Image (tube, grey):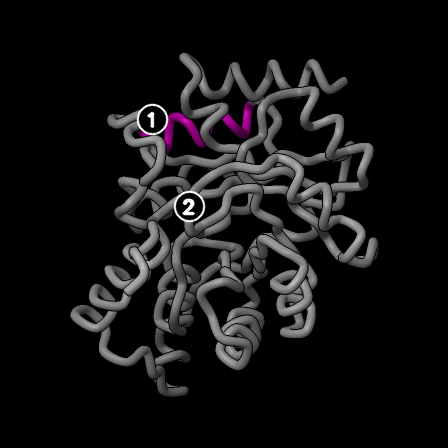
Amino acid sequence: MSESTHLDRIIAAKRAELSANRGDGVISARQLEQALAGLPPVRDFEGALRQGPAPRIIAEFKRASPSAGPIREDADVAQIVAAYEKAGATAISVLTDRHFDGRLADLEAARAATSLPILRKDFILDRSQILEARRAGADAVLLIAAVLEPPMLKQLIDFAHDLSLHVLCEAHDAYEVDRALSAGATLIGVNNRDLKTFEIDRNVALSQRARVPRSFTFVAESGIEGPEHLRQLRDAGVDAALVGTLFMGAEDPGAALASVLDALG
C-alpha cells in the first residue's frame, strides 16, 4: 500500500467531519429557499479580478499550514483583513479548514470587516459546504479538481452558480486545467504547490497560462515570493495572484502587501 499524502489525510478527515456533522450533503429545494432568505447580494469576485493593473492581489488569511506549521497562531482575522483592504488588496481569501487552524467563524468575521469580495478556501466535497459558505458571507468558493471526480466537479460548480457564488477552480497540471474548463469553470487557479507533497514549483502557473483562454480569468496560487515574481506573472498575462504566507509571515501583513504593490508600480 502506498504511503498516504498530506492531501489524502486532509480529505479523509474532511469526509469524516462531513459525515458526522451534516449527513450526505443532500439539500431539498425548501431547505435551500429557507437558507437563502434574506441574504445580501454576492459581491463580484471574478469581476474584481479583471479590473485595475495586473496581477490583482487576493490577500489570504491563514494562521498555519500542514507543511509550514504555525505562521501566525493568534492572528485576528478582522484586523488583518481590514489592513489588507486598506493596503490595496483586490479580494480576500479566508482559509476555513482546521488543518490550517481555520474555522467558519473566520469567514464570518472577515465579512463583517471588509467590503471586498471574499473567497472561502477549503476542501469542498459537497453542496452543504457551498451553502454554508454563502450563508457565512462568501462571494466565491474554491473547488479543487484533484479531489473531485469530473461529474461532481461540474455539479458543484453549477450549484455554486445557482447560489450566485463565483467558483475558483483549482488545478495543478494540464490534465486538471482541462478538467476545470470542461466542467464549466471560467475562473481558473493554478497552484504552484503540489497538494500531494506540498512542495512548491514556482513555474507551474506560468507553464499553464497558455492553456486557459484570455477571455477567462487566470489566478496563480501559492509560493509567491515578492514583486519580481509578480512581475513575471504579469508579463505572462496572469490576471491575479493569491498570496498568503508572504504576508501572514511578515511583521505587519498589511504593510507587507502595501510594500509589494508599491514595488510593482
* Earlier-in-chain disc, 1 versus 2: 1
Q: Residue furthest left?
A: 20
- Quarter location, residue 106: top left
Q: Residue at x 21, y 67 (%)?
A: 16
User: Which residue is label 1 attached to?
Assistant: 71
- SS for dot 2: loop
Would residue 78 appear left or right of 73 to someone viewing this image? right
Would residue 177 appear left or right of 94 to someone viewing this image? right
Where does the image place residue 85, in percent across and percent down from the top left? 54, 29
Q: Identify residue type, mark 1.
A: Ile
Q: Residue furthest front?
A: 1
**Does residue 260 sit above or below 50 in this rendering?**
above
**Does residue 176 sit above or below 219 in this rendering?**
below
Q: Residue at x 81, y 58 (%)?
A: 213
Label count reads: 2
Where does the image place residue 89, in percent across and percent down from the top left? 59, 31
- Give me the C-alpha separation between circle 1 and circle 2: 19 Å
Q: Residue at x 62, y 49 (%)?
A: 190
Would residue 152 appear left or right of 227 to someone viewing this image? left
Whether residue 58 can be seen here: no
Q: Residue at x 52, y 37 (%)?
A: 200
- SS for dot 1: loop
Q: Which residues are magenta?
A: 76-86
Identify the image quadrant of the C terminus: top right
Q: Identify residue type, mark 2.
A: Thr
Closest to the observer, 77 or 197: 197
Closest to the observer, 139 or 193: 193
User: Which mark lies nearer to you, 1 or 2?
Assistant: 2
Mark drawn on residue 197: 2
